[in-house]
Amino acid sequence: MSLALLRSRALTGLEAPLVSVEVHLANGLPACSIVGLAETEVRESRERVRAAILNSRFEFPNRRITVNLAPADLPKESGRFDLPIALGILAASGQIPLDGLDACEFAGELSLSGALRPVRGALAMTMGLGRDNAARAAAGAGPARAFVVAAENAPEAALIDGVTVYAARSLLEVCAHLGPLPDGRLPRAEPLVALADNGPDCPDMRDVRGQAQARRAMEIAAAGQHSALLVGPPGTGKSMLAQRFPGLLPPMTLEEALESAAVQSLTTAGFQPARWRERPYRAPHHTASAAALVGGGGNPRPGEISLAHHGVLFLDELPEFDRRVLEVLREPLESGRVTISRANRQADFPARFQFVAAMNPCPCGYLGHPSRPCRCTPDQVQRYQSRLSGPLLDRIDLQVEVRAQDQQDMLDGPPGEASADVRERILAARARQQARQGKPNAALAGREIDEHCPLAPEAQAMLRAAMTKLAWSARAYFRVLKIARTVADLEGAGLLQPGHVGEAIQYRRALRGP
């Protein structure tokens, strides 16, 4: 038989479309051609595959070899196709049996010695295989396929329920697995052990002394999944609050953990098993480019906002970021997704994160400080604050002033409330939201807001008066209404009262001129 067919996976954003690897051997001058929109890394696999086959004590066919990666219009990159190409050549030349090839999909990069090296995106590829197996089972199209990957990729790939994952260390081990002898079977990979729900391993809120209003705002943000902006002089604890914010969030569900881990697996660093079910916390420097935030490149990779999926994105010194960089946040804050378009492809990445930012009120940082005078002119303050566009500020739910504290309160005051205690109230509020509407308050839209945010007459009058006086947009009005809903949920109230609305209103007035 001079034709072999195997299956592997490509990567397009977080999607992993099926790729058929067809290998044909024909008479003619010895040559090896790879077709099917293969990029440089894939074309270079010819030399890696040749050396791996020879060093694994197989014979490299002295014939004309054609490798087709179908579909032909789907770009293929990375060295993940080395293993299926090598197996296809060995099967087409009759050195290994063809029978077991259809039962598995293969992905892995080969070293010259024949050892298997890990590739990025193993978890995303396994998720794609899992969906296809479910579709095949529903259609009665045949048994489920297993996945053969490098041993280093196997623990993360085995996280997907319903997919059998085999861990291989070399080309020889894979060939023995496909042979008739039972003692040559590859070991099945075991999934990672989930962390116990005993809270994330991060700094505790009890370290923050004072700042009752800012701590309360962080609690509301965590309870309703709201974005937050902390405004205040240097040294008031803005960064401390942000670093402790992940400790207030509910534990990740299995679905959230898998999505977050799949995004992490697309990066060069890969997914870290020790951080399984730990909410990501990303804090890029203010010199980061727009591509670093949203992702990009010739082969689109996820950026910081996608790496913060189901976690926290913290931008310190917010006005120091380039304005064009900040504007790219507007769409993901609304939609929870990022679409990167290139001439020959389009990649979608999830980006449902909680946005937390911090900034000083003016260039010198001491506007409104009780003991240190501000040295900035009104024009300087205006220019500094105007680095943040109105549309971006409009999308930030909570805008909180973090005031400078009295020295005695800061040094001798009692410690703050522990994160675990605050987290209990947040979990109770989240449970009320899930029971009522099946989603956090920040995700409410359209008629859902009217249905789930009923106002007492006095509260409605207060909210309308504030909208008129403060010249809010419709977006700002509904965001304040959703914040009031979260405040009521923390208290266990159903109807929104004036106290709930009044507290929500004060979280939209952090920025002020001189």
Image: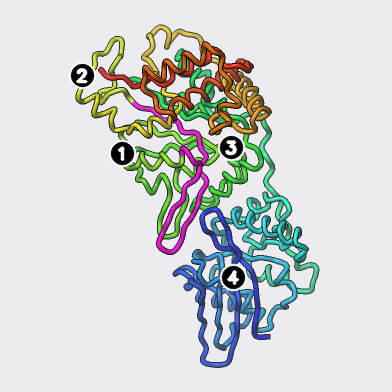
- The Cα atoms of the two marked residues, 2 and 3, are separated by 43 Å
* Residue of label 3: 278
The quadrant the C terminus occupies is: top left
Structural crowding at the residue carrying mark 4, measured as other residues with C-alpha within 10 Å and reported as few (<14), some (14–19) or many (≥20): many
Judged from the image, the secondary structure of the residue bearing numbered disc 4 is loop
Q: Magenta segment range?
A: 333-359
- The Cα atoms of the two marked residues, 1 and 2, are separated by 24 Å
Is 367 left, or right, of 343 in this rendering?
left
Structural crowding at the residue carrying mark 3, measured as other residues with C-alpha within 10 Å and reported as few (<14), some (14–19) or many (≥20): many
* Residue of label 1: 323
- Kindly check if marks 1 and 3 are in contact, taking CB atoms under 8 A apart as contact: no
Snapshot quadrant of residue 378? top left
Q: Which mark is residue 375?
A: 2
Q: Amino acid at mark 1?
A: Arg
Instruction: Judge depth for marks 4 and 3 and give the one in front.
Output: 3
Q: Earlier in the sequence, mark 2 or mark 3?
A: 3
Q: Earlier in the sequence, mark 4 or mark 2?
A: 4
Snapshot quadrant of residue 64? bottom right
Q: Which mark is residue 114?
A: 4
Residue at the image point whose x is 35% and y is 27% from the top: 359
Judged from the image, the secondary structure of the residue bearing numbered disc 2 is loop
Q: Position of residue 149 (x, y in %)?
A: 63, 61
